[in-house]
Image (cartoon, rainbow, N blue to C red):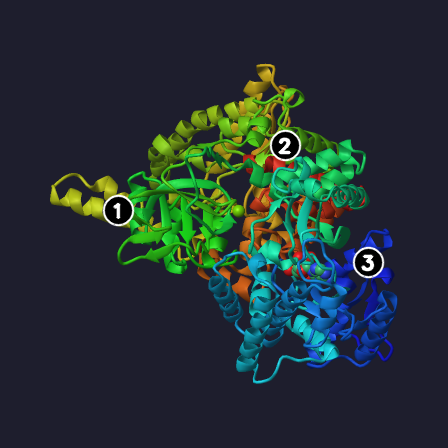
Amino acid sequence: MAAQETVDQKYVYDFSEGNKDLKDLLGGKGANLAEMTNLGLPVPPGFTITTEACQAYLATGREPDGLAGQIEAHLESLERAMGKRLGDPQDPLLVSVRSGAKFSMPGMMETVLNVGLNDQSVEGLARQAGGSTGQAASGGNDRFAWDSYRRLIQMFGKTVCEVPGEEFEQALDKVKSTKGTTNDLDLDADDLRGLVDAYKKIFLKHTGREFPQQPREQLDLAIRAVFESWNAERAVLYRRQERIPADLGTAVNVVTMVFGNLGPDSGTGVAFTRDPASGAQGIYGDYLANAQGEDVVAGIRNTVPLQELEQLDKTSYDELLGIMARLEEHYKDLCDIEFTIERGKLWMLQTRVGKRTAAAAFVIAGQLVDEGLIDLDEALHRVNGAQLAQLMFPRFQLDHEFQPVAKGIGASPGAASGTVVFTSARAVELAAEGKSVILVRRETNPDDLNGMIAAKGILTSRGGKTSHAAVVARGMGKTCVSGADEIDVNVPAKRFTVAGQTVNEGDVVSIDGTTGKVYLGEVPVMPSEVVQYFEGSLDPEHIDNPLVRAVHRIMTHADGKRRLAVRTNADTGADAARARRFGAEGIGLCRTEHMFLGDRRELVERLILARAEGEREAALAALLPLQRADFEQIFREMDGLPVTVRLIDPPLHEFLPPLEQLAVNVAVAQERGEDVAKEEALLAAVRRMHEENPMLGLRGVRLGLVIPGLFAMQVRAIAEAAVICARGGGVAKPEIMVPLVGAVQELETVRAEAEKIIAEVVGDSGVEVLIGTMIEVPRAALTAGQIAEAAEFFSFGTNDLTQMGWGFSRDDVEGAFFWRYLELGIFGISPFESIDRDGVGRLVRIAAEEGRAARPGLKLGVCGEHGGDPDSVHFFHEVGLDYVSCSPFRVPVARLEAGRAVVETGGSDSR
Ligand code: ADP
Ligand code: MG
Ligand code: MG
């Protein structure tokens, strides 16, 4: 974005001019400081330099015209208001210069405190600050002033001039050890004066210049450093991981300093208005007496729980609690805050709507409804499917005996235990023996793919949320902890060391892909409470678990709101039953492949090898009753609900043994002088059926057109099963789905044959069988108007549609190069994970519109994996589909998101 620069553009806003809705312009920190100011809360006066000024600076390398003058004007009015001048030798005004982007980027950018101090004003500050209780100095507070000055040189040196921070820390440690203490409070004014000298030398050594004494120069350089910190390496990395756009820029806040380091009646702290981990109500915070803000986070001294402030300073404590309640009521959400107490006077330095865990998100949304702060629509808006999915992963049953030995990034959720291996090959070997393995690597690369597939979980010592390991693991739904850098991996030696312990190949570890924690040994797992609730084993009305109660309440609301129905992909009665408990309203995809597997393989071989007419028919006749029984079971579990059955889709040779194995069998049998006629026939068949691109070969409807009787057998099995259910008093609603159709003629041919069989089987049983098609070949989407003439429903097979739309071989590309595409930002997320709205989504939209135009009652659904992806569900709602179908475990996620989609589009039915 090229920043707009106009002559009289406003770049600087006083806190009294902004508000919380101006985050784009003022950043989160600035917008909320303004909001608090306008609420009448005690915020030290100040002003915010806009993100637009930052964008202009970053684009041109210089401050935009007019900025300097506006800063001057705002500084002057600040000085007037405070009755002090910046850096005045007698009584200096000091300010902090703080970064603050639209999205919070904790610790990523810079802040400089105590700007305005120099060799003269430090004396003035000491004199003005005199008389603190507990201060020995008569008439002045030297210690405080010199402490503030050394902090300025340290922070300014580090952030503005890139002086290595360790050098300052080492100098501080040296003074402390000379003094025989580890507590910085034991240092007196003389020690700190000496430290300032040492710091200045460090500054000079690294920058080649003296520490700047001009207050205004300090201010300008600090502002510029904050602008530039937007492009610091770690900030760039963080943005990429969190998908924060790179062109937003940061605002800069210039805030009058208030001092928590003025003595024991001063201090600083941070707090949450509720527990961000569990959502529980109460006061959660830390307080540190006689300190400046950065000490709390830096962990220099041990903080005390905020509750203890009540004893130290009851007036400030009560005021703080009142403000926190007020902020919650105002923001109608969990807030986190930073505050400072200067000699018994409370100052608010920051607030924002706080980050929270998935569990806390649900619990808090429920509480806020109870408190009348938000309604259920808003509660639904504030949680999401990704959070719900997290709450459904099995979790470790952790009791005190399990302590994590390392913590990395929770890259792909889940809880996995297994034997440690260090190579892909070993992972494959042990997995073949039936062992659970955890693949441990420094980082993974495409060569590790087989091992990753074989492993139960993946642990790496390097790489973030978009590393190869993380992306591939998420794609596979596999537990992954990445970037656990305390772990030292030694692949050749087949071991890693962590926290002084050595873990060898063969030892067992457990990894938690949600928290990123790593444990030694096997931690037992259990289904989460939320899953127990969905399974129906917890009665939501009589449960005191606040999380389950909140989930129940919000899910119920989502169900009431949503327009999309949610079905499931299920191939067996057992899957169907579970999905139904999870709220599925039918089956959107029942694959029939497995009905040709197991001990039925032999029949498939006979079918494929059949030469004489009768042989094939006999094989099909033998398959018919078996498939019919399968369908019966599924229809019974889904009694009263629609069941979409997809006719056989994969290439038939997938049902035969692999070529190599057959070749070996033949050779061995020949060696032994056994009869190899059948083996040889199979081998010949496999050779004959070999395809270079099986995904684009003889599969789907093409099989049905080429192999006589195959689809007919399946259609008959479905219709007969439905009739049996109906005669038994049940209601079966079969929908026969033809895969891989690209032209209406294909469907018409299948339909003509199927209709005859159905009419014959159904008779007067009252059973109704729909016939429809998948839309998964781009040509089908583009000729949907024609295809709709022969279809009572469409189901979008967005996996194949993505594969063929992008020309991505699904089995190959994700592990091979998607990490690079993600790194380059070609897409933000794999198009197999979340639908590509612009391309593949456009095909869906065209087909939906043209299909409905040709046949107004056309039923539309989706059965690709996108059916359970939150963002895709919103898209399918917008396009006006009737239902989404997804795997059983995603059903609750889809229900929730379908409800959210309605709330977010203003409750409108967008069809
Ligand atoms: P971050 O975004 O990393 O938290 P902040 O800009 O909030 O950085 O500042 C770092 C610390 O300095 C915080 O603890 C904050 O409360 C404190 N601080 C910032 N400005 C002032 C000020 N004007 N007076 C006193 N403390 C301040
Ligand atoms: Mg802060
Ligand atoms: Mg398909």
Q: Amino acid at mark 2?
A: Leu
Q: Earlier in the sequence, mark 1 or mark 2?
A: 2
Q: Look at mark 1 in the image and give the residue it sits on.
A: 661
Helix, strand or loop under label 2: helix
Q: Hey, what amino acid is under mark 3?
A: Ala
Q: Position of residue 685 (x, y in %)?
A: 32, 47
Give the mark nearest the N terminus, 1 or 3.
3
The disc, 3 or 2, on the residue closer to the chain's N-terminal end is 3
The circle drawn on residue 547 is 2
Q: Is residue 24 visible?
A: yes
Question: What kind of element bears circle 3?
Answer: helix
According to the picture, the residue beneath numbered tag 3 turns out to be 34
Q: Quadrant of the N terminus?
A: bottom right
Q: Quadrant of residue 124?
A: bottom right
Q: Between tags 1 and 3, which lies in front?
A: 3
Figure quadrant, ligand 1: bottom right
Does the residue at mark 1 contact the one at mark 2 (Cβ under 8 Å)? no
User: Label 1: few (<14), some or many (≥20) within 10 Å?
Assistant: few
Q: Callout 3: 10 Å neighbours few (<14), some, many (20+)?
A: many
